[in-house]
Image (spheres, rainbow, N blue to C red):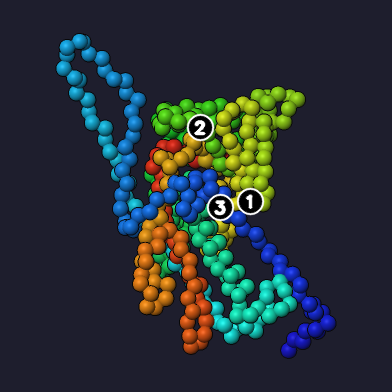
């Protein structure tokens, strides 16, 4: 039998301490796909397809005066099929239990669990935001996977039984043979003598050919970013009397830093250390030794589909279509309790898959 001395316990609780502060929405914000954002759209059906119709670089043919119009081949239309995943969670809180506890971080009674209830609702919203952030980071990698266990799906960046593929071409991944004429990443970025800027300019050239837009953004985590300011070519382009980077701005509250280099004007480096917990394991959104290159992104390049689902917040209420993320609480009796619900139906759409390339820069 273990006896704990009350003299070793605090007599008064006067503050609340959260061991983890999560502001996990930086990738959503970048793509403009936070709930209700400018690059979101609503769909009623969970499964469907969207069309891909490429522009053309072909030069119009000339013809002599008075000649009939020249026949050209119609532009092909591609199609991507999708199935929007669903997340539905709830937490049940007993009024009797909540009535007997203090306000979190305080000493007074939490009457009817008002504070505790609002905090639990915040956690459910946070979990759904983490899911959206995970999907977008997975899109940058090209795919994510899941494994079905009963009614539950366990997500991961890889290793699952089923794959959600965003159709990024194989040449835009790994060592990045983007144009079919040889790998772009041929030497490790961890080696200071590797010409990192030359690799980036080759990516820019390939993106222009593939999409009509050049390189604008590069995403990576801090362990990979360390190779950049230590690189000889980057230092030489900046000049011996200057820092290797031209600008460096930090938003430590959100785990995000942005930088530009003198030798690569117009390109923003996004140093992102945010994580999600997948099957209980903390996993960085942007993996070690991986670098994601992309063009300027807008709603013509990336969107987020918010699928609709009929919801009746409590028994007897008419069902209403709710799109994307939706949250509600309902009261139940015997025993008296409140259930907090969080629902999300959504999936990123990568409308121009060639606009993103993710390379392994140390293999």
Q: Which comes before the other along the chain, label 2 or label 3?
A: 3
Q: What is the x, y in percent for residue 324?
A: 43, 58
* Residue where numbered disc 2 is placed: 215
Instruction: Give the tally of numbered discs.
Output: 3
Q: Nearer the viewer, residue 90 or 285?
A: 90
| Residue occupying image coordinates x 59% and y 41% | 270
| Residue occupying image coordinates x 39% and y 78% | 315
Query: Separation of disc 2 and disc 3 at Cα?
Result: 23 Å
Q: Residues within 10 Å of mark 2 (few under 14, many from 20)?
A: many
* Residue where numbered disc 3 is placed: 25
**In the figure, 177 relative to 132: above or below?**
above
Helix, strand, or loop for circle 2?
A: loop
Q: Which comes before the other along the chain, label 3 or label 1?
A: 3
276 sits to left or right of 141:
right
Q: What is the x, y in percent for residue 226?
A: 66, 40
Q: Residues within 10 Å of mark 1 (few under 14, many from 20)?
A: some
Q: Which comes before the other along the chain, label 2 or label 1?
A: 2
């Amino acid at each position: 039998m273990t006896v704990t001395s009350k003299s070793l316990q605090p007599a008064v609780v006067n503050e609340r301490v959260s061991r983890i502060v999560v502001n996990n929405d930086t990738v959503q914000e970048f793509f403009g796909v936070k709930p209700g954002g400018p690059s979101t759209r609503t769909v009623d059906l969970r499964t469907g397809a969207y069309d891909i119709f490429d522009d053309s670089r072909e030069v119009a043919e000339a013809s002599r005066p008075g000649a009939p119009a020249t026949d050209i081949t119609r532009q092909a239309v591609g199609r991507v099929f999708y199935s929007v995943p669903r997340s539905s969670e709830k937490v049940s809180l007993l009024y009797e239990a909540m009535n007997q506890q203090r306000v979190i971080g305080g000493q007074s009674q939490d009457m009817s669990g008002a504070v505790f209830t609002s905090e639990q609702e915040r956690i459910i919203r946070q979990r759904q935001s983490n899911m959206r952030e995970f999907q977008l980071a997975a899109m940058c990698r090209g795919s994510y996977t899941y494994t079905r266990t009963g009614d539950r799906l366990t997500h991961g960046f890889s290793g699952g039984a089923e794959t959600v593929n965003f159709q990024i071409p194989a040449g835009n991944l790994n060592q990045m043979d983007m144009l079919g004429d040889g790998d772009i990443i041929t030497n490790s970025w961890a080696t200071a003598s590797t010409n990192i800027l030359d690799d980036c300019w080759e990516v820019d050239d390939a993106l222009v050919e593939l999409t009509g837009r050049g390189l604008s953004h590069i995403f990576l985590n801090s362990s990979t970013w360390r190779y950049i300011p230590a690189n000889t070519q980057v230092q030489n382009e900046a000049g011996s009397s200057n820092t290797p980077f031209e600008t460096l701005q930090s938003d430590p509250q959100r785990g995000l830093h942005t930088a530009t280099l003198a030798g690569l004007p117009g390109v923003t480096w996004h140093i992102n250390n945010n994580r999600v917990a997948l099957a209980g394991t903390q996993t960085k959104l942007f993996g070690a030794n991986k670098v994601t290159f992309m063009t300027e992104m807008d709603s013509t390049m990336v969107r987020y589909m918010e699928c609709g689902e009929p919801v009746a917040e409590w028994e007897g209420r008419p069902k209403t279509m709710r799109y994307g993320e939706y949250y509600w609480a309902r009261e139940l009796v015997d025993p008296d309790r409140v259930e907090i619900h969080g629902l999300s139906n959504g999936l990123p759409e990568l409308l121009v898959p060639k606009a993103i390339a993710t390379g392994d820069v140390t293999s």
